[in-house]
Amino acid sequence: MSALVLRGVHKSFGTNEVLRGMDLSLEEHEVVCLIGASGSGKSTLLRCVNLLEPIDAGRIMLHDEEITRRGVDLNAVRRRIGIVFQAFNLFPHMTVLRNVTLAPRNALKLSREEAEARALRLLERFGLADKRDDYPDRLSGGQQQRVAIVRALAMQPQLMLLDEVTSALDPELIAEVLEVIRELAEGGMTMLIATHEMSFARDIANRVCFLHEGRILEEGPPQELFSSPKEPRTRQFLERIIEAGRL
Amino acid sequence: MASEGNRRADLEVEARRSRVLGGLRLEAEGARGVAIALLSTVVFVTAVVVAVTQSPGWPEVHRVFFDWHDISSSFPEIARAFVLNVKVFLACEVFILAFALLIAVLRSLPGPVFFPLRALAIIYADLARGVPTILVIALLGFGAPALQLQGVPTSRVFWAGVGLVLIYSGYVAEVYRAGIESVHPSQEAAARSLGLSRVQALRWVILPQAIRRVIPPLLNDFIGLQKDTALVGTLGVVEAFNQSQIDANATFTFGSYLAAAALFVAITIPLARFTDWLVARDRRRRQTAGVLG
């Protein structure tokens, strides 16, 4: 049983067709990285999977249950899918602990004690326990992003979506966030990751998909795709990345 | 990129701080700045005082407006009447805060399903802000009791209060709405992505941030409301303004007006300082470690 399947997903914003028949499937415990130029549809794809954007055509299945059918309970689906954004999007008026316990308490109806115990275990695990009472604007970007990851994990999702989670970070803060993701992968978390960090993708992904003009143009194990891409466009993209010193 | 953003945020915070704390903008300029400010204030005030007291009509104005005996003798009665202004103000404020929030939330509901509610909220805000307050108070204060309906209060003060609530809710709803719209959509996306419902996202994520941001303009509207409680007097109810008019008519002097003005100012200035304090406290709480949280 696949953890996630996309069949022929189309999505347009006005006249701009961003996803043009996207097919993709993820097995459980699989880590798939999406690479591709800006505007190739990586973020839109993730937002569609989390049902933050309604799709125009196609189907998305989460553990064999179609989540894009009419009348589906959006909130119930989203509780099973964690998403982390490029800009962290922490709630600035709440402490770290409140950020992490808000959804478990209100969406999962956990008691305050249960939710806090769960949150503290996660904060502890990712070295953030001493930040529990801080407000987000007191934290570094790297710490904020780790809190955002913890906030998503506190819902105990079956699938994590990471949307260029290191793109807004200063270079020296990227490693700490990537380390968290690596640990999640080792723990068996199923993840779909949009990223510009090619070396990270090469390390962590079971499979890398190259997105071009709203479709997956080429996919394969990272070694294969990075060292011997078949499509000229993939090659062109990777060459530009290498020129920029990012691989 | 991120540090660039942080720097910009820092600058904005700094600019906001100097706007809030530096109303008089002296602290950065040191002793010399204070001395210059003092001197220029003395010169300015002296010039104004001289110009006014040398004016041909001054002796008469002084007698009519500034007779200390008039002011102090009318003060106790006006202060007693002023209690009604404060009561109306406090009662109205509670209802305005709740009712206006409802209007603002209705107006920010997305999607075609809610179009009628949105339209109603817009029409309401337009009407409430379009009709002069004194007219609404007169219409309700004289009209509603005249209906003599069973169970409908006949108190003019009550209906004047209803009028104030209706009018001010229109303004306050717009203030709330500006706050709601100032919260970045990514905040709602983050809340919804965690499985929170639309109402939960509004309750826990959008509104707390929105309301915090609009506290200064909200308090501003309440300072206006406190002053407008004087309009209750137009219905013949004896509140501070009406009482001061009664005194003025009895003595043919206007010292009582000054006494009433002093009472209004005694409420509105502390309100303004309270607003500043709230804003400063909120900023401190978010910038120091969670000991206060």
Image (cartoon, rainbow, N blue to C red):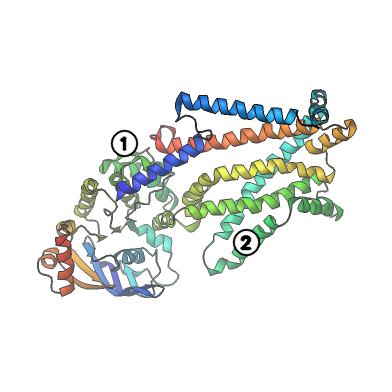
Label 1 neighbour load within 10 Å: few <14, some 14-19, many 20+: few
> Residue at the spot x=28%, y=70% of the render?
A5
Q: Pointer 2: what residue? A: B122
Residue B279 on image: x %, y %: 51, 38
Do the residues marked 1 and 2 share a common chain?
Answer: no
Residue B15 on image: x %, y %: 44, 41
Q: Is residue B94 above or below residue B132?
A: above
Name the image quarter holding residue A42: bottom left
Chain under callout 1: A
For the question of whether residue B142 can be seen, the reply is yes
Chain under callout 2: B
Residue B177 on image: x %, y %: 56, 54
Give the structural element (helix, strand or loop) at label 1.
helix
Residue A81 tag number: none
| Number of numbered markers | 2
Residue B25 on image: x %, y %: 50, 33
**Which amino acid type is marked by label 2?**
Ile
Front position in the image: A46 or B210: B210
Label 2 neighbour load within 10 Å: few <14, some 14-19, many 20+: some
**Which amino acid type is marked by label 1?**
Asp
Q: Is residue A46 left or right of residue B95?
A: left
Front position in the image: A101 or B136: B136
> Residue at the spot x=62%, y=50% of the render?
B172
Q: Is residue B145 left or right of residue B166?
A: right
Residues tagged 1 and 2 counted as in contact (Cβ below 8 A)? no
Residue A130 tag number: 1
